[in-house]
Amino acid sequence: MKLLNAGNNKTIKGEKWGWRTYGLHLAPYTLAGKNVCPHASAGCAAACLNTAGRGIMRTVQEARIRKTKWFFEDRKSFLTQLIKEIKSGVKSARKAEMNPCFRFNLTSDLPWHELSVITENPKLLFYDYTKDKKRMLRFLNGELPPNYYLTYSRSENTRDEEIHDLCRKGGNVAIVFRDHLPSEWQGIKVVDGDINDLRFLDGFGKIVGLRAKGLAKKDETGFVVEP
């Protein structure tokens, strides 16, 4: 079974900037019997993009469930296949004169920094969003692999003070806004996170603005912020 895809509607936009993202879709929350999103809020769960695009297809959902079960039931062979596909992706991207990068938490929030796949590929770039504040702080303190970039993802449970604190420390925080993006949020510059998925190019101490899509348009939990 193939694990990585070479682009969805969002990640493929990065090719205009010379980057090709290879991503991994797992079955979010407990859809496969294991919780791969332990820090997800009710608003995040309701607005999940798991069924966006081709994700609406039954065969795609079944494949994500199989991948997730494989990850938990036979980690060794899963990582062997993942490493094989990373090497293949690098060759393919470079053949197309693009830089390869990898995002393993497209629909999950697992601590990939704890697995050797990132540290054993120090010349490759990995990135993710996370709702794990402790993990984000470890990233800002330089305690995670230097080739692994994180963006913190706000939920309706995140206090504004937490966002300001993370930005002061040099971190970026993703916020989902309704309808349109403001130029700043509470005095912090907002960058358009829908232009591409290359979060490692955003700079530091900024808000990554994302427009509400799909189920998020109907959010009433506070997950989506009114601009």
Image (spheres, rainbow, N blue to C red):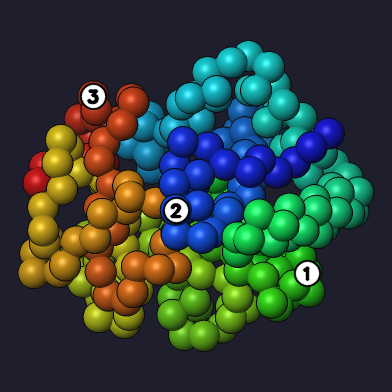
Count of number-bearing discs: 3
- Circle 2 crowding by C-alpha within 10 Å: few under 14, some 14–19, many from 20: few
Residue with the mark numbered 3: 218
Q: Which residue occupies the foreground of this view, 84 or 119? A: 84
Query: Could one spot residue 133 in this view of the protein?
Result: no
Residue with the mark numbered 2: 16
| Mark 2 residue element | helix
Residue 197 lies, in percent from the top left, at 43, 52
At label 3, the amino acid type is Lys
Tag 2–tag 1 contact (CB < 8 Å): no
- Lateral position of residue 225 relative to residue 48, left or right: left
Residue with the mark numbered 1: 116
| Mark 1 residue element | helix
| Mark 3 residue element | helix
Residue sitting at x 24%, y 28% = 217
Vertical relation: 73 (above or below) 80: above
Closer to the eye: label 2 or 1: 2
Residue 48 lies, in percent from the top left, at 43, 33
Residue 70 lies, in percent from the top left, at 82, 39
Q: Disc 2 and disc 1: Cα gap in Å?
A: 30 Å
- Lateral position of residue 107 relative to residue 6, left or right: left
Quarter where residue 224 is shown = top left
Query: Could one spot residue 212 in this view of the protein?
Result: yes
Residue sitting at x 21%, y 71% = 164
At label 1, the amino acid type is Ser
Tag 3–tag 1 contact (CB < 8 Å): no
At label 2, the amino acid type is Lys
